[in-house]
Amino acid sequence: MSLIITSPLRGWATTLDGVPDPVFAQRMMGDGVAIHPLGDTVVAPFDGEVLTLHDAGHAVSLRSAEGAEILIHIGLDTVMLKGEGFTALVAAGQRVSRGDPLIRFDLDAVALAATSLITPVIVTNAEAFAISRRTTDCAIGACEALMTLVPVQAEARRRSDDGTIVEQTVTLSLPHGIHARPAARIGEVARGFEADVHLMKDGKRGDARSTVALLALGTGFGDDVVVQARGDDAEAALAAVVALLATDMGEGKPVAASVVPTATVPLRAGQIGGVIASPGLAIGPAARLRQAEIAVAREGAGVAEEGAALLAARGAVRARIAARADSASGSIASVMQAHLALIDDPELLAAAESRIAAGHSAGFAWRGATHDQIAAIRATGNEHLIERVDDLVDIERQLLSTLTGTPIDGAAVAAGAIVVADDLLPSQLVTIAAAKPAGICLARGGPTSHVAILCASMGLPALVAMGDALGTVEDGTPLLLDAELGHVSPSPSAADADAFTARLAQRAARRAAAQAAAKDACHSADGTRIEIFANIGSVEDAALAAAQGAEGSGLVRSEFLFLGRDAAPSEDEQHAAYQAIADALPGQPVIVRLLDIGGDKPAAFIPIETEENPALGQRGVRVALARPDLLETQLRAILRTSPAGQCKIMIPMVASIDEVRQVRQVVERLRGDLGIATPVEVGVMVETPAAAMTADLLAAEADFLSIGTNDLTQYVLAMDRGNPAVAAGVDAMHPAVLRMIGETCRLAAVHDRWVGVCGGLASDPAALPILIGLGVTELSAVPGFVAEAKQIVRGLTLAEARAHAELALQCRSAAEVRALARAFEETRR
Ligand code: PEP
Ligand code: MG
């Protein structure tokens, strides 16, 4: 049953978007309508009860007999007037009938003193009522229909009225906050439960099933978000959403601004610089795209007809995106999933339907709903979320193109051309990519937008944020796109074009050689065996690593296999996971790191007391030794894998020899209990300065050492690896870290133990020659880097790597080391 809210004032009704106060414009208190008052008396908008009347007399809240709660806030910043100019005509608790006077105010005096007279009328219990229709952009009299409210999910609420309300605060580890892809995943998880789940941040509240509502929260890395669930399965829903939010959803650590690749050399005359969104080189003629606005009629042909048109168009767009998602993988598939969530987003849909109900056409309604959401996202001021606006615009264009039959620009790019555009939408890029362009140049966009991510995953060289200068590039102009140095050269000289073509040929040969030899064992140019392994966080990663030519896994992050759990994984579950990974890498070493819980990797199933300094507290082996039950369960699960010895054991966060001895003792006891005759290797992670400087002592106890450069860097430099404020400085190429690595190799050699690197530095092409030169003989990289890593190593002799590493150790800063590494690479081109 719907409820009509009538206008509490005579005036001009408008949307909240125009209210010059983000609290209202961003719907932090709820949705509603705003009125520019022409009358001086606020009257009751329904029959009900006065809930509150502010002492300053400028705001009143009421509850209707049906339970809808409304706030009427006269003007902005009027609380400062301390009651001056306002006369309360009712008191809290008083029953009122529609049209009863509530507050009278001195229109002129308040208008002069306040920031604005605009009066928001807000539905404050959005979890119970949604606005199905509203009157805006017209004059309105007091007691004329302003909004129609409908109960929200009456079914769910009835259930949840008897159910529980539970909530928990999570600190976001998502590097860019909740943008479209994480929002889609949160929605997917929330939809698996009956309970209503909301996320709240700084007084803003968003339905977990609504991507746009989550975007409008404006979250960023490290923000505290309250997750609230209400309903019968509230506990389970809360646990699932919290567990997901506690991860980085595979997005990695935040990229420090200084790490975002930009043009790295001064521009020559005529060159146009840009930000590197996807590295590579391309040569070809410019294919200029110009986006035309799709025109839609304002007036609709009737609610039923427009509703049906919207439904049909959404169905067609959904089917098209789903088909693309089915045939895609990786980033493309996840962008498509985010788009699928947007086409069915409950808030967008409700907003579009209410516009259709107000007499607008389906296209006009969808555009209006989209633009409201874009305004809300822009108002967050969060750069990364704003980059996601293009996903909303993309869905809008696809929908309007379907509704109006207007073809979307970009389908007719010639193969080998360099696409030049103001900006591109993800779906346009996917269409264009099918034509096999050579590269992309965009005047706008950012390096972390979906278009940038897609270009990188397709290996399509791309520059973004090139600015207005790109507008001077005419269709057909020959271009050299250098997305290694960050510029494009229009109409190059013949000599420049020749030199560029030679570079391109060199790169292509290198890539082809890397792929062709991806499965071959890796030796340096002078025959030293260097093992190239892959880091693994899931069984799928193991299959991917094998396909990329990994010679084993140098780091199975076992804690990643059991994310989102509130109970510790059983021995059998763990055994099944380790066995599946071992089976995916037949005959190859698989180094399973013992659960590395604590610090930046909390796990719900191992509660750890709140610590002032978690990175210096209970983590890694310290937790294992404090919880022998967990340690023994995991060790048995690893030891039971077959063939015996394929899975090796690695101990995280070691600081002293005693920790290694204790774990080794348990391993040997369990091996005896299980009757396993084959020795099982036990290695140590070098992640603390203590481990690095006592590598000889550890090597006497351990079968191998593997350097975790991510943690080693944070502990050597005393810079939190998860703190964006110091992220720019957390560079493992710092000479202090390199010296620690060199020392570890030197000390481990005393006992003839091999040293590997499984931290992020093993996936950094610039670092590989230095690491090999320092004495590292095993690299465990991200699966996608394995083939290239092998190729880099094959091009090196040990002697030249050692000489290069020696110079690196003498550098005075990470920047100097990186410049040295660039120069080294240059000499090898
Ligand atoms: C490291 O610290 O380098 C490492 C490999 O471990 P993680 O990144 O999982 O802490
Ligand atoms: Mg670590």
Image: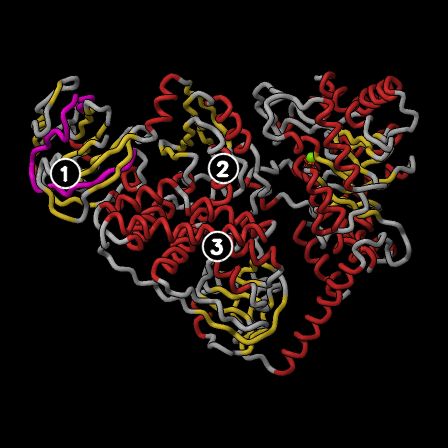
CB contact under 8 Å: marks 3 and 2: no
Q: Are marks 1 and 3 in contact (CB under 8 Å)?
A: no
Q: Nearer the viewer, mark 3 or mark 2?
A: 3
On the image, which quarter does residue 293 sit in? bottom left
Quadrant of the rendered image holding ligand 1: top right
Q: Amino acid at mark 1?
A: Ala
Choose top left, top right, bottom left or bottom right for residue 757.
top right
- Crowding at dot 1, Cα within 10 Å, few <14 / some 14-19 / many 20+, comes out as some
List x then y, in percent, for residue 112: 12, 41
Q: Would residue 544 appear left or right of 404 to someone viewing this image?
A: right
Task: Identify the magenta region.
Answer: 30-53
**Gap between marks 1 and 3 measured at Cα:** 40 Å
Residue at position x 77%, y 29% in the image: 651
Amino acid beneath label 2: Glu
| Disc 3 within 8 angstroms of ligand 1 (CB) | no
Labels 1 and 2: the sequence-earlier one: 1
- The answer to whether one can see residue 499 in this image is yes
Identify the disc placed on residue 188. 2
Q: Earlier in the sequence, mark 1 or mark 3?
A: 1
Where is residue 508? Give x, y as percent: 71, 67
Q: Looking at the image, is 759 positioned above or below residue 433?
A: above
Q: Residue at x 66, y 74 (%)?
A: 500
Q: Is residue 213 left or right of residue 597?
A: left
Above or below: residue 158 compared with residue 396: above
- The disc placed on residue 520 is none
Determine if the magenta segment contains residue 44.
yes
Mark 3 or 2, nearer chain start: 2
Residue named by callout 1: 145
Q: Tell me the quarter of the image containing the N terminus.
A: top left
**Which of the 4 image quadrants contains residue 742?**
top right
Cα distance between the residues tagged 1 and 2:
37 Å
